Image: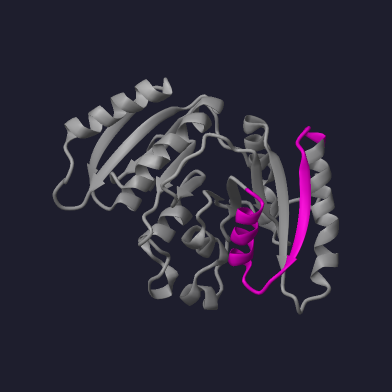
């Protein structure tokens, strides 16, 4: 699975610091993928910002980035409308700034934000930080034994080639499961070899930890990773309906930008490349 080129990068705007930061994060990604930018302001009852303000922001974005930037104003739920618009326009990528209070916590773990990412027709980059760096030197790719985990590899390589970045493959296993590390190692070595064949530097690390999301975010911060690329789960267990999935928690807690890719609709992935 790749990030589609020659398309549109859609950026939902609520004028928070995070959503303005999301615009800046879009510049290099849009340039590398030859995409246009589209700012989308959605209000539920009464707009708190005018079309003139949004137009001014689009003009400023065009001037700063040198990229084509359009805009639209819609009424409704920002997450639902973003997914609808992304599907209609066949968007390549959604870049969304999330306020600190926007969390994946609600009955059965089905908040609007989590539904938004799960229902998105394209990859979604979520950003909680209010700071921005144009550089991306290190990409963190969590890897496990699920079939969908391998689906993100082409997109991660694509990003690494865009930015001339390194890839760090990280596998987290329960400290009590001594056999897991041996089970996953052959697959990690396959992926690592495949990445290096694409002339991308790659390392791998196994981490024993109970909380996968916390371990990954902690590793990202300690090793200066600029982005985490993860897959959404295809199926959700009964327990996860209440507590949320690991991918939901990752978006919820990470101060590092997280690119979430939904699984392809086919059922199986090959075990080798």
Q: Is residue 17 left or right of residue 187?
A: left
Q: Position of residue 195 (x, y in %)?
A: 77, 40
- Would residue 191 be found to the left or right of residue 75 on screen? right
Q: Position of residue 106 (x, y in %)?
A: 38, 71
Quadrant showing the N terminus: top right
Q: Which residues are magenta?
A: 197-224
| Count of marks, rendered view | 0
Rendered location of residue 181, percent (x, y):
81, 66
Residue 85 visible in the current orientation? no
Q: From this view, report whether residue 237 is shown above or below residue 191.
A: below
- Percent position of residue 148, x then y: 66, 55
Residue under the image location 44 percent in, 31 percent down? 8
| Residue nearer the viewer, 98 or 12 | 98
Which residue is depicted at the point 78% across and 48% down? 203
- In the rendered image, is residue 111 in sight? yes
Residue 172 sits in quarter: bottom right
Magenta stretch: includes residue 198: yes
């Amino acid at each position: 699975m790749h990030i589609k080129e020659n398309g549109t990068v859609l950026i939902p705007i609520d004028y928070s610091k995070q959503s303005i930061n999301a615009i800046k994060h879009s510049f290099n990604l849009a340039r590398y993928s030859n995409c246009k930018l589209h700012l989308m302001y959605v209000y539920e009852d009464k707009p708190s910002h005018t079309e003139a303000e949004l137009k001014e922001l689009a003009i400023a974005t065009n001037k700063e980035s040198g990229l084509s930037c359009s805009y639209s104003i819609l009424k409704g739920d920002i997450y639902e409308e973003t997914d609808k618009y992304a599907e209609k326009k066949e968007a390549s990528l959604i870049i969304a700034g999330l306020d600190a209070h926007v969390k994946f916590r609600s009955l059965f773990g089905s908040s609007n934000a989590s539904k938004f990412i799960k229902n998105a027709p394209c990859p979604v980059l979520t950003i909680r930080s209010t700071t921005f760096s144009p550089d991306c030197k290190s990409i963190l790719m969590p890897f496990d034994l699920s079939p969908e985990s391998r689906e993100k590899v082409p997109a991660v390589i694509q990003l690494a080639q865009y930015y001339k970045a390194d890839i760090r493959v990280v596998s987290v296993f329960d400290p009590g499961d001594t056999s897991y590390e041996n089970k996953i190692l052959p697959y990690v070595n396959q992926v690592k070899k495949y990445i290096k064949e694409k002339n991308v530097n790659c390392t791998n690390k196994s981490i024993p930890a109970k909380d996968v999301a916390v371990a990954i975010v902690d590793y990202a911060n300690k090793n200066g990773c600029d982005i985490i690329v993860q897959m959404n789960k295809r199926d959700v267990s009964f327990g996860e309906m209440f507590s949320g999935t690991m991918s939901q928690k990752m978006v919820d807690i990470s101060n590092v930008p997280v690119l979430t890719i939904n699984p392809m609709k086919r059922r199986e992935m090959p075990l080798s490349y």
